[in-house]
Image (spheres, rainbow, N blue to C red):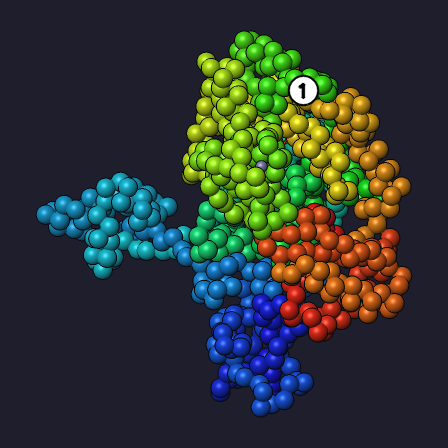
């Protein structure tokens, strides 16, 4: 007897055995094929792990597989191995990890066949003379197809005014033939469409290091904003394409813009496949197949694209490697950047992690000689690095967050005919609404958080749980009508700037102003026209954009992350400041960056503004070592949440009591209430496990998880584990 061992997207950390379908032949099932199985009252798509001859399940409890979906696996073994590695490392249920490594279309049971484009060609030794003179439309269609000796698609025929309904008629007369389009790649000398730029010495050195060494190597391409990292990627990819190999490029969620894609498309004469969110499930699957079958030499995507198979892998590039979006913060909590290194090692290809503000982890890996550190400290072309000014706003009177000196400087830059960027990392009108009589703040009923006041349209909005309500007319504590907005968000800053500079266009960029499709493109078009304007926005402005005419960047509140409870707060603040600053002076205009702060004497902030990110990062690393924090310590967080206060914490206490004696070599701290204990109506608590030894922590976690799963409360409390957490909340 044989049994099918199947991985199913269930929260249980195990596999499930099934009987093969009736009259099935032994040996026909290859691991990796998809199967449909009954599970509880549902039917799920699972992945066959192996065919076994023994099972622990009593025979009368076993159910047969409902349907075999594939005859051969669609996903290569090494991608399954990567997903299994990640399931093990991140302590995630294997079934869910494996299924998440497949395109959604396949997860939902879609047929594993890619759509093809069909083309038509005329048959050799035929001519329009084979058609009757009176069949004008058939004549015209034949002529049209004859003009495209490489073949023409239905869409192209229609676009040129041909009658596609007559295709079958001509086919039946054996005058034309239909065939599947295949993408044959151009010869090595014809790969390039647009000439590469002559590299400056630091770029040249980086390119040489990346392309001359064989096999697996991890490079940290640490180059200031505008130093020409993308040019290095492009030329490294060119070397890979010349060998007939493929490149996989991961970019942050917000970075997969048409401009980014355009840079790759205009350089190479090969298909560039982008896995972006506006594709349908089927289109994504088709793109995935093109990558898997080697028809797409260049594949660009966000986090989940790390599981895209390549037929002939040649290089992996992670752009903006410090970006938080590479770490999935829900469910399967993997880091695509770290998995990319594992993948590159398995495939024996080079991997490039690029950033102007590398993560402290990656800098530490360089110091440990695990990664090769490639630096670019000069800006490309004529651009020069921006000047920083820490502007002490203690005791100054501010006009809705703007100091008068800042207003004067904005005025000067506009007068000289350039553009200004005002950065404020809060959307909405004001971060809270206060009662002037009793001091009560408008709080979210479901979170330990204040409601943000929005005016366009007018409402209160919780940015943590998304609940919304109308703006109250009076205080619900004392009934007073004296409700006042406190602090400023993008809407209020926009309004203030509009009053101060009535003749200058003010362009607001945040999640609200860009929600409508095409609105971001419209704003960018106006900025790129180059006439004076003020851009006001959140971190959406900080990533990936080129604003050649911006000469002044103003950061209204540099302090928000300085005293965060999260040990990464300072690192994140520094990265954000440098990234926003990097938008200034990218072309021929020198740039200036003003940081408004109440802590102008803060040592790390001063260091950042005067000495730059590299020196800042070294100091911050020293502090991390001193306090034994990552990257000098490895951590995992066990989080629990429950609808009643204290219950989640009680659960974690009990876990700690039961288990900490067995795993006493690692450090246990907590449980503590999460920094925002109540969120979206549930109370959250966390237990932090840490060790200087990654293997020891790993070993402990893999024995600990089954213990938690078996805890009597585990099925009634939502709990999760986050290995190498990015966000401590
Ligand atoms: P980064 O990716 O480091 O931010 P980019 O590759 O986008 O930098 O380069 C910034 C600008 O400098 C781009 O406009 C690019 O075309 C230009 N550039 C890059 N390398 C060179 C070079 N070697 N010579 C001249 N211009 C360059
Ligand atoms: Zn009140
Ligand atoms: Zn809320």
Confirm if mark 1 falls within 8 A of ligand 1. no
Q: Secondary structure at mark 1?
A: strand
> In the rendered image, which quarter is residue 93 located in?
bottom right
Residue drawn at point x = 45 percent, y = 23 percent: 526
Give percent across and percent down for residue 544: 59, 33
Q: How many marks?
A: 1
Left or right of residue 315, residue 428 in this image: left
**Residue that sits furthest to the bottom in the current view:** 60
Q: Nearer the viewer, residue 35 or 713?
A: 713
> In the rendered image, which quarter is residue 241 located in?
top right
Q: Which residue has dot 1 on it?
A: 594
Q: Nearer the viewer, residue 537 or 546?
A: 537
Position of residue 54 relative to residue 409, above or below, is: below
Residue 300 seen: no
> In the rendered image, which quarter is residue 26 located in?
bottom right
Residue drawn at point x = 89 percent, y = 61 percent: 665
Assess disc 1: are there few (<14), some (14-19) or many (≥20) residues with their C-alpha within 10 Å of its C-alpha: many
Give percent across and percent down for residue 611: 79, 23
**Residue that sits furthest to the left in the current view:** 134
Position of residue 263 relative to residue 290, above or below, is: above
Position of residue 143 relative to residue 289, above or below, is: above
Residue drawn at point x = 67 percent, y = 85 percent: 56
Residue drawn at point x = 78 percent, y = 57 percent: 671
Quadrant into which the N terminus falls = bottom right
Give percent across and percent down for residue 133: 11, 47
Q: Nearer the viewer, residue 483 or 480?
A: 480
Q: Nearer the viewer, residue 622 or 353?
A: 622
Give percent across and percent down for residue 577: 68, 29
Position of residue 122 relative to residue 653, above or below, is: above
Residue 9 seen: yes
């Amino acid at each position: 007897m044989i049994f099918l061992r199947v991985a199913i997207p269930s929260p249980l950390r195990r596999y499930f055995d099934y009987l093969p379908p009736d009259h099935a032949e032994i040996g026909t099932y290859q691991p990796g094929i998809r199967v449909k199985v009954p599970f509880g009252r549902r039917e799920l798509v699972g992945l066959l792990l192996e065919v076994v001859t023994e099972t622990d399940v009593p025979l009368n409890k076993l159910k047969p597989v409902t349907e075999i979906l594939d005859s051969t696996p669609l996903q290569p073994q090494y991608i399954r191995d990567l997903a299994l590695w990640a399931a093990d490392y991140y302590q995630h249920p294997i079934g869910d990890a494996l299924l998440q490594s497949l395109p959604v279309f396949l997860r939902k049971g879609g047929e594993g066949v890619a759509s093809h484009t069909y083309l038509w060609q005329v048959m050799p030794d035929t001519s329009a003379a084979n058609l009757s003179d009176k069949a004008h439309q058939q004549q015209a269609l034949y002529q049209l197809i004859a003009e495209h000796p490489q073949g023409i698609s239905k869409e192209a025929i229609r676009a040129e005014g041909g009658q596609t309904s007559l295709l079958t008629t001509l086919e039946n007369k054996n005058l034309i033939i239909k065939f599947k389009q295949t993408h044959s790649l151009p010869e090595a000398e014809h790969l390039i469409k647009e000439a590469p730029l002559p590299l400056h010495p630091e770029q040249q050195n980086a390119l040489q290091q990346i392309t001359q060494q064989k096999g697996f190597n991890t490079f940290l391409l640490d180059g200031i904003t505008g130093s020409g990292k993308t040019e290095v990627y492009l030329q490294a990819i060119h070397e890979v394409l010349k060998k007939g190999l493929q490149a996989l490029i991961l970019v942050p969620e917000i970075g997969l813009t048409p401009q980014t894609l355009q840079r790759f498309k205009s350089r190479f004469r090969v298909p560039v496949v982008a896995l972006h969110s506006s594709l349908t499930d089927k289109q994504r699957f088709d793109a995935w197949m093109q990558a898997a079958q080697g028809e797409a030499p260049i594949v660009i995507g966000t986090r989940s694209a790390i599981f895209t198979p390549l037929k002939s892998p040649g290089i992996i590039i992670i752009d903006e490697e410090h970006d938080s979006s590479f770490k999935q913060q829900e469910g399967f909590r993997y880091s695509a950047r770290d998995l990319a290194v594992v993948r590159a090692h398995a495939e024996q290809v080079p991997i490039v992690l690029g950033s102007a503000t590398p993560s402290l982890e990656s800098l530490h890996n360089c110091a440990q000689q695990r990664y090769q550190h490639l630096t670019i400290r000069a800006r490309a072309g004529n651009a020069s690095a921006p000047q920083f000014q820490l502007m002490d706003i203690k005791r100054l009177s501010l006009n809705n967050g703007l100091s008068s000196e800042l207003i004067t400087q904005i005025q000067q830059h506009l007068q000289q005919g350039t553009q200004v960027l005002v950065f404020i990392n809060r959307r909405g009108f004001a971060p809270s609404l206060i009662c002037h009589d009793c001091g009560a703040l408008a709080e979210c009923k479901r979170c330990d958080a204040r409601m943000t006041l929005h005016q366009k349209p007018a409402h209160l909005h919780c940015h943590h749980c998304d609940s919304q309500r109308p703006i109250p007319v009076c205080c619900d504590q004392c009934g007073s009508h004296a409700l006042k907005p406190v602090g400023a968000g993008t809407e209020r800053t926009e309004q203030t700037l509009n009053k101060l500079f009535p003749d200058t266009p003010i362009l607001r960029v945040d999640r609200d102003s860009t929600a409508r499709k095409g609105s971001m493109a419209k704003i960018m078009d106006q900025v790129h026209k180059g006439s004076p304007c003020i851009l006001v926005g959140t971190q959406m402005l900080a990533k990936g954009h080129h604003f050649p005419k911006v000469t002044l960047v103003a950061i209204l509140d540099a302090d928000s992350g300085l005293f965060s409870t999260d040990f990464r707060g300072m690192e994140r603040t520094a990265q954000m400041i440098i990234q926003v600053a990097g938008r200034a002076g990218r072309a021929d205009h020198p740039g200036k960056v003003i940081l408004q702060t109440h802590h102008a004497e803060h040592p790390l902030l001063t260091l950042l503004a005067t000495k730059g990110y590299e020196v800042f990062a070294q100091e911050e690393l020293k502090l991390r070592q001193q306090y034994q924090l990552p990257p000098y310590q490895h951590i995992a967080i066990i989080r629990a949440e429950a609808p009643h206060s204290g219950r989640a914490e009680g659960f974690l206490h009990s876990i700690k009591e039961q288990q900490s004696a067995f795993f006493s070599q690692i450090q246990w701290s907590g449980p503590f209430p999460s920094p925002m204990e109540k969120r979206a109506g549930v109370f959250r608590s966390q237990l932090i496990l840490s060790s200087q030894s990654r293997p020891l922590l790993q070993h402990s976690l893999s024995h600990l998880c089954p213990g938690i799963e078996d805890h009597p409360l585990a099925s009634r409390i939502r709990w999760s584990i986050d290995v190498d957490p990015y966000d401590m909340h």
